[in-house]
Amino acid sequence: MKRKYLFFDIDGTLAAGGYEYTYIPESTKLALQKLAEAGHFLSIATGRSNGMARDYMDVFGIRNMVSDGGNGLTLDGKLLGIEPLPMDLVVELVNECNTKGFPWGLVVDDSPRRMCPDTSFLDFTGDTYMECVEIPGCRPEQFDGVFKVNIACMTGEEQKLEILKKLPWARFHDDYLFVEPTDKARGIKRMMDHLGAPYEDVMVFGDAMNDLSMFIDDWTCIAMGNACPELKAKADYVTADVEEDGIYKACEHFGLFEPVTE
């Protein structure tokens, strides 16, 4: 068995139960243990910020991570760095939001906080996923970097924002969206380049639309049985649901529990 480099999404892939109630199937824990003992490289691949995903590294016993939608890299527990969004486009986007009346907040460091110029974002969304820190009159330019922008708007209203077309974004809530990196494959390639390892030895595991970016032809792509149809259509292999031992069965199918010999 040649050493493989395995990259796992979190929710719906390694963890089950949805965003509100997340747990790790016992079979997944056993699979991760056996993969590590066999000598494979294990990494998380998530859209979450490094700061909001580090606890999962401890839970899963995984020391490596592609975070921030591909813009953050952690190797052997050490953060190598996080690339911010293009500042010029962030400034243009905030200006357009101000003109069109969309409240916003900025994630400017590796913590679960968003910086807001007033209370309008919190008033609109009531969201507690991240802490809202009110800084009257705050602007993107006053920070060293902006890693995410949250924009309060109902589904469909984002079409009114022209600058948004130039930036990556995702929506997980009806009343606000995340402007954030969404290219997990780019982060995986950066990790492999750093390690000096070939792309062909990568195997990725995912379930949701935000995993589409890492389902590319350069490596082996495995979709969970509970994955969205779009991801299954791009997968090289579809395993069982996360709650039906999907991770374990996929690893068994590919013979990944055999010790690495090269």
Image (tube, rainbow, N blue to C red):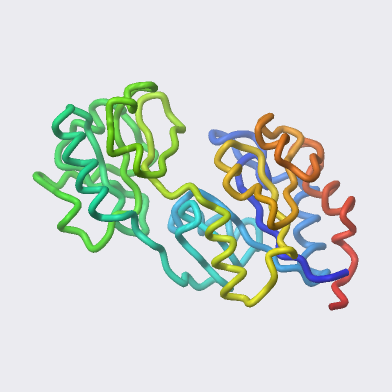
> How many marks can you see?
0
Residue 54: x %, y % from top left: 51, 59
Residue situated in front as seen by the camera: 62 or 164: 164
Above/below status of 118 relative to 220: above
Is 22 displayed left or right of 246 in the figure? left
Residue 3: x %, y % from top left: 79, 70
Above/below status of 234 relative to 219: above
- Which quadrant of the figure has residue 195? bottom right
Residue 52: x %, y % from top left: 45, 52
Above/below status of 189 relative to 102: below
- Determine the residue positioned at 48% across, 49% down: 48
- Which quadrant of the figure has residue 173? top left
Quarter holding the C terminus is bottom right
Is 15 displayed left or right of 154 in the figure? right
- Which quadrant of the figure has residue 196? bottom right
Residue at far left of view? 137
- Determine the residue positioned at 61% across, 50% down: 214
- Determine the residue positioned at 69% across, 57% down: 218
- Determine the residue positioned at 83% across, 53% down: 251
Quarter holding the N terminus is bottom right
Residue 141: x %, y % from top left: 16, 56
Residue situated in front as seen by the camera: 110 or 1: 1
